[in-house]
Image (spheres, rainbow, N blue to C red):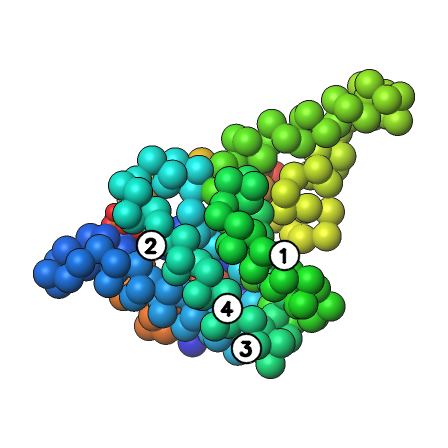
Amino acid sequence: GLRREAMPEHLAVIMDGNRRWARTKGLPVVAGYEAGLRALKGMVQLCCRWGIRVLTIFAFSSDNWLRPKVEVGFLMRLLERGMKDEVNNFMRDNIRFSCIGDTLKLPDPVKELITYAEERTKHNSGLQLIVAVSYSGKYDIVQACQSIALKVKDGVIEPEDINEFLIEQELQTNCAEIPNPDLLIRTSGELRVSNFLLWQLAYTELYFTQSHWPDFGETEFVMALRSFQQRQRRYGKRDS
Ligand SMILES: CC(C)CCOP(=O)(O)OP(=O)(O)O
Ligand SMILES: [Mg+2]
């Protein structure tokens, strides 16, 4: 079974395969996205039950803006509906909600809801749910560099003060407070990181499954966690 004391502190998930799931069932794409949202709600409940402290999910990448307008529009409305439906549950379940990514590009109703949900849940001390939307791992590093360069220009710090810790503090995941992900799960058989968290995944255990995201339920989640608990993490130390 699962060892409760060996749960990942921070779990990152790329929820991929929603459209393929719909296609295999002869359903429209939007049914795949709806099923994906249901699977996400299920995972959030399991993370609360199993004491996983941080869950970061890749909900919409900056590349996803290139999808057909109809699909982008639906995903934006799904994001809005998801937050509206869930914010009361976040308070019930003591979940702290936040977003990372270039949120300025989002429609105003979505931006306003994100601000509201972040504000309302910011004192919750249970699961921290981080939703990466309009997010790019490379841009995250770029904006951290820009922020640090500004501090050097303003004389707040010297170039030699720049180190890994300083950079981690400037990343949107604010690694100073949040440990980097221990486990990354990606569904639907793709074996790539797709410009998700890049710096943060330096020593993260990677788990891939053929299952499409909407089919990723408790059984698949337990299998992923069992795999994680069987791994020996070295952080680059021992070469054996
Ligand atoms: C927006 C994102 C969470 C959707 C992930 O599923 P997807 O649309 O990439 O589905 P496919 O990989 O099957 O095309
Ligand atoms: Mg995909």
> Which badge, 3 or 2, is on the more N-terminal residue?
2
Q: From what the image shows, is residue 76 above or below residue 214?
A: above
Amino acid tagged 4: Lys
Amino acid tagged 2: Phe
Q: Secondary structure at mark 1?
A: helix
Q: Residue furthest bottom?
A: 92
Residue 131 at what x, y percent from top left?
52, 54
> Which badge, 1 or 3, is on the more N-terminal residue?
3
Q: Secondary structure at mark 3?
A: helix
> Which badge, 4 or 2, is on the more N-terminal residue?
2
Q: Residue furthest left?
A: 26
Residue 115 is tagged as: 1
Residue linked to disc 4: 84
Quadrant in which the N terminus is drawn? bottom left
Amino acid tagged 1: Thr
Residue 202 at what x, y percent from top left?
55, 39
Residue linked to disc 3: 89
Task: Please tell me in which quadrant of the rendered image residue 23 appears.
Answer: bottom left
User: Does residue 211 appear to the left or right of 28 in the view shown?
Assistant: right
Residue linked to disc 2: 74
Give the alpha-carbon distance from disc 3 to disc 4, as whole Å.
10 Å
How crowded is the residue under tag 3: few (<14 C-alpha within 10 Å), some, or many (20+)? few
Is the Cβ of the residue at disc 4 closer than 8 Å to that at disc 2? no
